[in-house]
Amino acid sequence: MSSVPEARTAGTSRPTRVLVVGSGWRFTSGISYYTCRLANAFAERTTTSVVLMRRLVPRFLYPGRSRVGSVVNDVDYSPDIDVYDGVDWYWGRSARGVSGFLDRTRPDVVVLQWWTGAVLHSYLLLARALHRRGAKVVIEWHEVQDTGEARVPGVVRYVRSAMKALLRRVDAHVVHSEYDSELLQGAYGLDPRQITVIPHGPYDHVLDATAVRSDAATGDAPLRLLFFGTIRPYKGLEDLVEAFSSLPRELAEKFRLTIVGETWEGWTAPLDAVRNSPNGDRIDLVNRYVTDAEVRTHFAAADAVVLPYRRSSSSGPLQMAMSAGLPTVVTSVGGLVEAARDYEGAVFVPPAAPVELAAALRGLLERRGERYADPHSWDTSVTRFARVFATLGVPGSVAGPRAASADARAPRHDDARRDVVA
């Protein structure tokens, strides 16, 4: 990680005006939640606005096309935040309207959330407009390129070519791990001094303080395992099903595996494996994108989480598991090792290794009822962003948390100030 000094606050007369750009709620994904949680964390410290990417792609191209436009979230933006909802992939009125929004909010610095090439042309538009207005531009990379896009040669060439134009307008880069920093340097030849590692913030909005498990600590009830997240080739769910299927029947009866996730990229191999499993009657499948209320129910019911990724830069479900304090079996791939290395509940196993994964499942029986502290916080994330802003000479200051700040985790739908494009 590059060395950055403490944020400068002396001599500043106003809060720094921060703009966060990321995924909106129409095409809800993990980045939609991250954009919201980061913006709410900034809003507790400083003046914050948000520009959302609304229609990411033509609907028929989106893996979750059947739920586009459905409301699954009850987490929303703080009423302190100006929200522009949003910019469509085809621009039109949505692109013209964002210019007036930028004139009104006058951001000093923008944090662009990067996760897909679908937003690249819009990010170029915004970066140019913001540079004309004197704002600094920071990209926060969640991965160098989406795994599904990376398998499409034309998309890879487009992103690599057009990204060069965007990078000329970027002042600093943020990643979640040293692993991603090295990937980014290798992909685009970036100066490592421009890259700062800031860990992913917690997803404690999945916590349900009212949930009570009467059987959670008893040895008679089955240990409830949870796999959560989209079902895609790199998620390794088929490895978990194979490991679970390999358990002797008397051992399998000590567990209950719940799989919660929406199928993407036509990846049905794990579902076929569930149907053919000798322990299939011990597996519950919820094959869709669930609401926030359902997420809280599933994590409250779980005794442990299992995330058998074959590759990953970062993981929202891993953050959820740590926020819930659950024992978590996770593969030692990509940035996940760094994300969970300070989490005492983490059990690391090799990727694509069902035998080792089955052994880790057996070991979870000894951790029944144990809970662990999440080492991550949004306060840490914002503090480190403030240091990055300081090195860029961004005006104003990102001070300590406001005494009267709103709860960033509270559900909000009707009180945030929004510019909505019809």
Image (tube, rainbow, N blue to C red):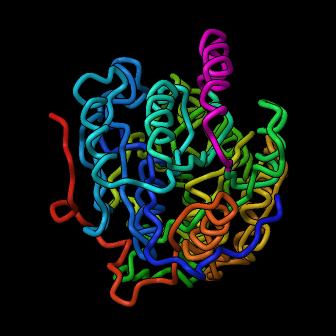
**In magenta segment, residue 165:** yes
Quadrant assignment, res 324: bottom right
Where is the N terminus found, in terms of image quarters?
Answer: bottom right
**In magenta segment, residue 340:** no
Q: Nearer the viewer, residue 96 or 153?
A: 96
x, y (%) of residue 21? 44, 46
Quadrant assignment, res 93: top left
Where is the C terminus found, in terms of image quarters?
Answer: top left
Number of callouts in the render? Answer: 0
Q: Nearer the viewer, residue 55 or 251?
A: 55
The residue lying furthest to the bottom in this view is: 403
Residue 209 appears left or right of 238: left
x, y (%) of residue 109? 51, 54
At horizontal 46% and vertical 78% (from top left) the residue drawn is 13
The residue lying furthest to the front in this view is: 11
Q: Is residue 160 visible?
A: yes
x, y (%) of residue 115? 56, 38
What segment is highlighted magenta in the picture?
148-173
x, y (%) of residue 206? 43, 67
At horizontal 81% and vertical 48% (from top left) the residue drawn is 179
Q: Is residue 259 visible?
A: no
Q: Is residue 410 above or below residue 35?
A: below
What secondary structure is the magenta-colored segment mainly?
A: helix
At horizontal 32% and vertical 53% (from top left) the residue drawn is 291
Q: Is residue 47 above or below residue 269?
A: below
